[in-house]
Amino acid sequence: MFNIVIFGAPGSGKGTQSDFLVKKYNLIHLSTGDLLRAEIAAGSELGKLADGLIAKGEFVPDNLIIDLLANAIDKNSGASGFIFDGFPRTVVQAGALDEMLTKRGMQVDIMLNIAVDNNELVARLLNRGKTSGRSDDNLEIIQQRLRTYEEKTMPVIAYYDKQGKNTPIQGMGTMDEVLARITNAVDKVKK
Ligand code: C5P
Ligand code: MG
């Protein structure tokens, strides 16, 4: 089993790179943003709450998102590993992830910390907004999401740093260039 946390600001390429990594390493991609958008599409109570929060660039409460992720893990109990994308978003979520994995005899093996310049993030998200149909891919909410990332999510880096799992990845450049850096880092850790 091999489990990856793919980490970085909105627009850093977590979802794009996960699509490649899923195939290369035979992993299950668990994106909490995608899971929330599926809840919205299904019209569930969680979806109704998430809809308003996502449109404002705010986070769903830790306890709800933690339960959502634990359920998704348990639905894929035969997996040979996971990529966690968009989670942990807070230090509380990072602790909860360790706890839920430990309970299941699993662990985070590597945290890929993708760094992209802020002006590039904004440009990518605005470009994605032309076709994504996402309520949060507009300039005002993009700026809000980047502020929230700095305040609430960046402290997660220190959490993984202490565990020796934080692996900085230069995220500027083409998708292929970034993928090569990532697979190089993964192959050093994965047996
Ligand atoms: O990861 P992604 O950018 O798809 O997430 C979109 C939105 O979903 C976030 O801006 C936030 O509103 C919500 N979200 C959350 N908690 C998470 C992941 C996503 O509240 N752990
Ligand atoms: Mg994403």
Image: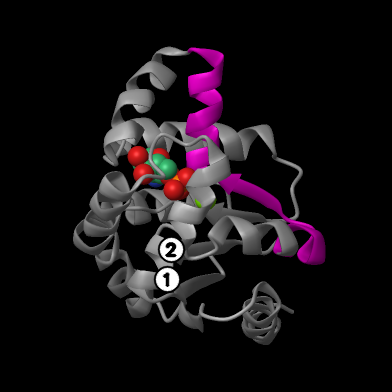
Q: Position of residue 153 (x, y in %)?
A: 29, 59
Question: Which quadrant of the figure contains the N terminus?
Answer: bottom right
Residue span colored magenta: 21-43
37 to 170, vertically: above or below:
above
Q: Amino acid at mark 2?
A: Ala
Q: Amino acid at mark 1?
A: Glu
Q: Position of residue 134 (x, y in %)?
A: 47, 36
Q: Position of residue 85 (x, y in %)?
A: 52, 53
Q: Position of residue 16 (x, y in %)?
A: 63, 59
Mark drawn on residue 9: none
Residue in the image at 31% along x and 69% along y: 159
Residue in the image at 67% along x and 76% along y: 179
- Dominant SS in magenta: helix
- What residue is shown with label 2? 123
- What residue is shown with label 1? 120
- So how many labels did they put on this image? 2
Q: Quadrant of residue 26?
A: bottom right
In the image, residue 77 lies in the stretch drawn in magenta = no
